[in-house]
Amino acid sequence: MSKKATERSLEANEAKAVIRHIRISPRKLNLVAGLIRGMSVSNALTQLSFSGKRIANDVRKALQSAIANAENNHNLNVDELYVKEAYVGKNLVMKRMHTRGRGRSAGILKPFANLTLIVREKGEEAPKKKVKKAAASGEARSAKTESKKPAAKKSAKAKAEK
């Protein structure tokens, strides 16, 4: 008896690549990831290859890996791909010591980050999930607050007249 295969977490027209333990701070990596969010794959590769940031080369390799996964594992059209998501997560932090004058020391933090890229095919739309009713109740709440605002102004005017 073998273990059941886990279900695919992505939709049929998506592919993913994850790079872990990248030696850069997540904040710096997020700047580069933000450059390519929503771009077509060809434009994103061009943008990364001409970027002056050190980490852009690693992000480009991750994007190429996601493209290869889409083409080879999921039979997606490479020309129709775009970067749906590019998000960064924290990883471990190495702590080092830096000696200072007069017998003191200071800490040095060397953070690591994770990068996840999800590419999606433009041509076909996957079936969307049902919209929850919470959005409709949120609209009703905003209508109630709008009706309260003029009433508050009237009471302020009434107080001024007295």
Image (cartoon, helix red, strand yellow):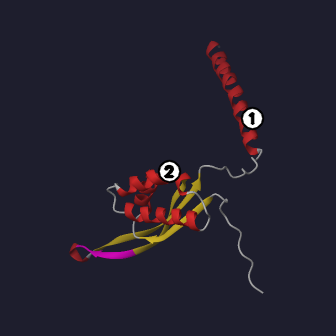
Query: Is 112 left or right of 77, judged from the image as shown?
Result: left
Query: Is 6 left or right of 112, judged from the image as shown?
Result: right
Q: Secondary structure at mark 1?
A: helix
Q: Which residue position holds label 1?
A: 140
Place of residue 153 in the rendered image (x, y in percent of width and height, measured from the top left) = 64, 21
Q: Nearer the viewer, residue 19 or 11?
A: 11
Question: Of the residues shown, which amino acid type is indicated by label 1?
Answer: Ala
Q: Residue furthest bottom?
A: 1
Tell me the distance, in whole angstroms, between the alpha carbons under discs 2 and 1.
38 Å
Place of residue 73 in the rendered image (x, y in percent of width and height, measured from the top left) = 60, 68
Crowding around mark 2 (Cα neighbors within 10 Å: few <14, some 14 to 19, many 20+) is: many
Question: Of the residues shown, which amino acid type is indicated by label 2?
Answer: Ser
Which disc, if any, is residue 111? none
Q: Which residue position holds label 2?
A: 40
Q: Quadrant of the N terminus?
A: bottom right
- Above-or-below relation of 39 to 154: below
Q: Nearer the viewer, residue 13 or 9?
A: 13
Q: Nearer the viewer, residue 107 or 72?
A: 72
Q: Residue furthest top?
A: 161
Rendering quarter of residue 136:
top right
The range drawn in magenta is 95-100
Q: Quadrant of the C terminus?
A: top right
Instruction: Please tell me whether the stretch drawn in magenta is mainly helix, strand or loop.
Output: strand
Determine if the magenta segment contains residue 98. yes
Q: Secondary structure at mark 2?
A: loop
Residue shown at 74%/81% (left/top)? 3
Determine if the magenta segment contains residue 60. no
Residue shown at 72%/51% (left/top)? 127
Place of residue 99 in the rendered image (x, y in percent of width and height, measured from the top left) = 26, 76
